[in-house]
Amino acid sequence: MKLDKIRIATLADAFEIATLVNAAYRPKSDQAGWTHESNLISGSRTSYDQIIEIIQKNDSIILVGIHDTKIYACVHIEKTDDHCYIGMLAVAPASQDSGLGKEMLNRAEQFAIDYFSAEKFVMIVLSARHELISFYIRRGYQKTGTSMDYPLSAGVGLPKQNNLRIEVLEKVVALRTLSS
């Protein structure tokens, strides 16, 4: 499938985004795509209220990928100092493994450079999601060596195993020079 357009989310998109993110991250077993965390975490990944908060926050946007008026993909970008946090990358389970995740990540990075003058991209990933970490490493991200306990108080679900950790990945923006 090819997206018709990618645009900045509005408040009217919040419910559809929350539904998409929860379906991508914590699907029922018969609806799972190639990557998810249902085996690691229970509960919702996000809520309508959390999406509203992200959209309304300064220097924070969600890009949505649209096909036939429906949101099939999204990614959150938030500026912090000289870097941008990129997270909540989600693709509808039935459309995963079709290149939409790569396309959305590329667009998020370009948006971060163009609108937030990002010098570095930072993301947080569950340490146990090896296939996802590999996906990001293939796209130029590196492990920083920084890891933390799973954020129990963040309202993003509860771990199904003890000692679940998150780790920080980053990618430095390549400087481009004009050749004469």
Image (spheres, rainbow, N blue to C red):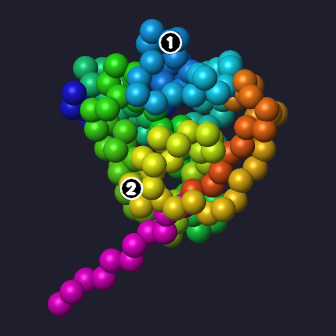
- Label 1 element class: helix
Q: Which region is colored magenta?
A: 170-180
x then y, percent, for residue 47: 64, 22
The numbered dot on residue 155 is none
Observer-nearest of 164 and 8: 164
Q: Residue at x 48, y 42 (%)?
A: 132
| Residue 50 appears left or right of 101 | right
Regarding residue 19, the answer to whether it shows in the image is no
Tell me residue 157's x, y (percent).
71, 25
The secondary structure making up most of the magenta span is: loop
Give the Cα separation between the discs numbered 2 and 1. Answer: 28 Å
Magenta residue check for 153: no
In the rendered image of this protein, does residue 8 appear above or below residue 96?
below
Quarter-of-image position of residue 48: top right
- Residue at x-position 25% and y-position 20%: 68
Say which of 82 and 44 sits in front. Answer: 44
Residue contact at pointers 2 and 1, CB within 8 angstroms: no
Q: Is residue 136 visible?
A: yes
Residue at point 57%, 60% (across, down): 143
The residue lying at 30 percent from left, 20 percent from top is 69
Q: Which residue is mark 2?
A: 139
* Category of crowding for the residue at label 1, using alpha-carbon neighbours closer than 10 angstroms: few (below 14), some (14–19), many (at least 20): few
Question: Which residue has dot 1 on it?
Answer: 29
